Amino acid sequence: MGVLVAGKILALGALNRYRHVLWFPSYATEKRGGLCECTIIFSDNEIPSPIIDQSQTVIVLTGSQLKNFEPRVLPGGMMLVDSAGLDEDERERKDYKLLQIPGMEFALSTGELHNNLILLGAYIEVTDKVPPEFIEEAMEKMLGAEKLIKERNLKAFRQGIELGASLKSNPIYV
C-alpha cells in the first residue's frame, strides 16, 4: 500500500500550496498485497469530481503496470514509472513523456525499500508542483513520533529528489 501512503503525503503537502486538494484511494478487497491506486488532484480552482479519466502526470510504482496505466495519461502529459520490470515494448502511445525512474534499483542499493517515497521525491523535483519542504512537513505529521521510521522515509524521499535532479539534467525520456 506504498502508493496510498505516498499519495496521502503528496495530498497533505499540497494543502500548503493549493486551495483545493483531493485524495481519492481505491483498493481491492484483499487486506495485503492487493492492487491499489489513488488519485490526487490539487488546484486553486474548485474540483468538480474525484473521478477523472486521464491525468497530466501518472506515477507507476511497478514497471510491469505500464500497459494498465498508459491510457490514463493525457496526450502531452508525463508518466513516471519505475524502470524495474518495465517492458518498453508494451508501450502503445508516443504522445506523452515516459520518464523511467530506477527507484527500486536505487532503494535496493541503499538497503531501504521505500520505492514509493523515492518516486515521490523524483516527481516533486521533476515537476516543481509542490515544494519539498511541504512534503517533508506532511511526512512529519503522518509518521508521528517513531524517529527511525521518519528518518528512513525522509532519507528515501531526499534520495528521490536527488535522483529527480540528476534526471532533469540528463532525462531518460522515451
Image (cartoon, grey):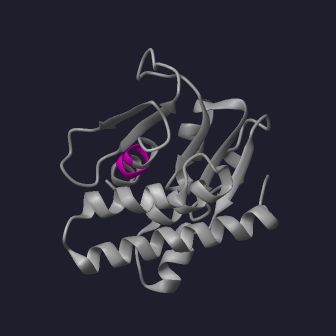
Q: Residue at x 27, y 57 (%)?
A: 142
Q: Position of residue 89 (x, y in %)?
A: 72, 49
Q: How many marks?
A: 0
Answer whether residue 69 is magenta in the image: no
- Name the outermost residue toward the bottom: 110
Q: Residue at x 70, y 43 (%)?
A: 91
Q: Please tell me in which quadrant of the rendered image residue 29 appears.
A: top left
The one of 51 and 135 positioned closer to us in this rendering: 135
Q: Position of residue 66 (x, y in %)?
A: 59, 46
Main SS class of the magenta portion in the image = helix
**Vertical comparison of 39 with 127: above or below:** above
Q: Is 174 placed left or right of 164 in the picture?
A: right
Q: Position of residue 69 (x, y in %)?
A: 55, 38
- Name the outermost residue toward the top: 48
Part of the protein shown in magenta = 8-12
Q: Residue at x 42, y 49 (%)?
A: 13
The one of 62 and 127 positioned closer to us in this rendering: 127
Q: Position of residue 150 (x, y in %)?
A: 31, 73
Q: Residue at x 59, y 61 (%)?
A: 122
**Vertical comparison of 160 with 12: above or below:** below
The one of 46 and 54 positioned closer to us in this rendering: 46
Answer whether residue 11 is magenta in the image: yes
Q: Is 64 placed left or right of 101 in the picture?
A: left
Q: Is 79 placed left or right of 135 in the picture?
A: right
Q: Please tell me in which quadrant of the rendered image residue 94 appears.
A: top right
